[in-house]
Image (tube, rainbow, N blue to C red):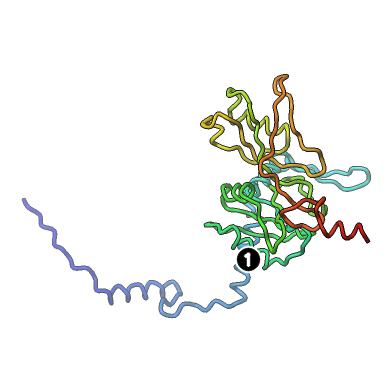
Amino acid sequence: METSLEKSSPPSIENNRSTKRAKFKAQGVDADNPPHVSFRDKLLETQMELEEEFMGKEEDIDIDIRDVVIERERFLPAISFSQKVHSQLVKPWQSTVVVKLLRRSIGYKVMCNRLEALWNMSHDFSVIELENNYFLVRFKRDSDAQHVLTQGPWIVLGHYLTVQPWSLHFDSTNEKISSVVAWIRLSGMPLHYYHKKVLRLLGQVIRNVIRIDYNTESATRGKFARIVVEVALDKLLCSQFLLDSKIQKVEYESLPTICFECGIYGYLVSSCQKKIANEVR
């Protein structure tokens, strides 16, 4: 026995629109006349989105009674959190850098506009203004943070823009810039040390490691390892260290030439005309 399926013609566009209007009206919404959203409601919605972006949602973090200790230490109330809580708190800030314009103050909007034009990122980033002309820049992708940290120098309004990775120990109340980012080379290093974990450990002998050149990880160059590290400005540069009892030389590649007296990129403080003029006086 054959069964034929009768084809039904699709509803007309007008009928479809009528159905949609009826559905919206049944739900209390007029499709042709959407409800007016006041400026106040838009502002509150934006504020809530910003709060969630920077402060997180309650469900984003797992804290139980064992993760918090409240007590008194030396006559002061004290509270401390477990390592589990700290790990959760740090995670959203892993793709964040700290920037500061040397020897020049700059407003929040001007800084945002300058960074957007300077970096030309394909993804959005957020900027938070802190004390002492520091700014936190939070990226959505770690690769964007790595680009900003390693592809300088960055110049804003003629002054050098310092960029350093955010860390738990960053203190915005300290006005002094303590470090800059630089590439180092481990020339002549035996090839069997070319391993990602080993290279990171070797870089940490000098300072905090930010990035490793992936070409050296695969040993395609076979000449030297290149690593991006933080260089402390208040300490002597490490020119060599002992690697399994043998001397390993450290070469600094493209170390920023900055005058920390006036904040200008391109010459050192020893050549600063402003400092020389002040000393003459």
Which residue reaches farthest left?
A: 1
The image shows residue 250 at horizontal and vertical percentages of 70, 32
User: Is residue 232 shown left or right of residue 224?
Assistant: right
User: Is residue 37 shown left or right of residue 88?
Assistant: left
Q: Mark 1 points at which residue?
A: 113
On screen, 170 above or below 204?
below
Q: Residue at x 76, y 64 (%)?
A: 105
Quarter of the image where the C terminus is located: bottom right
Badge 1: few (under 14), some or many (20 or more) residues near its Cα, within 10 Å?
few
On screen, 33 above or below 107?
below
Q: Which residue is drawn at 64% across and 37% down?
A: 227
The image shows residue 268 at horizontal and vertical percentages of 78, 50
The image shows residue 204 at horizontal and vertical percentages of 70, 33
Total marks in image? 1
On screen, 185 above or below 159?
above
Q: Indicate the secondary structure of the residue bearing disc 1.
A: helix
Return the residue nearer the eye: 101 or 11.
101
Amino acid type assigned to the residue bearing label 1 in the image: Asn
Which residue reaches farthest top?
A: 245
State the image quarter where residue 86 is shown.
top right
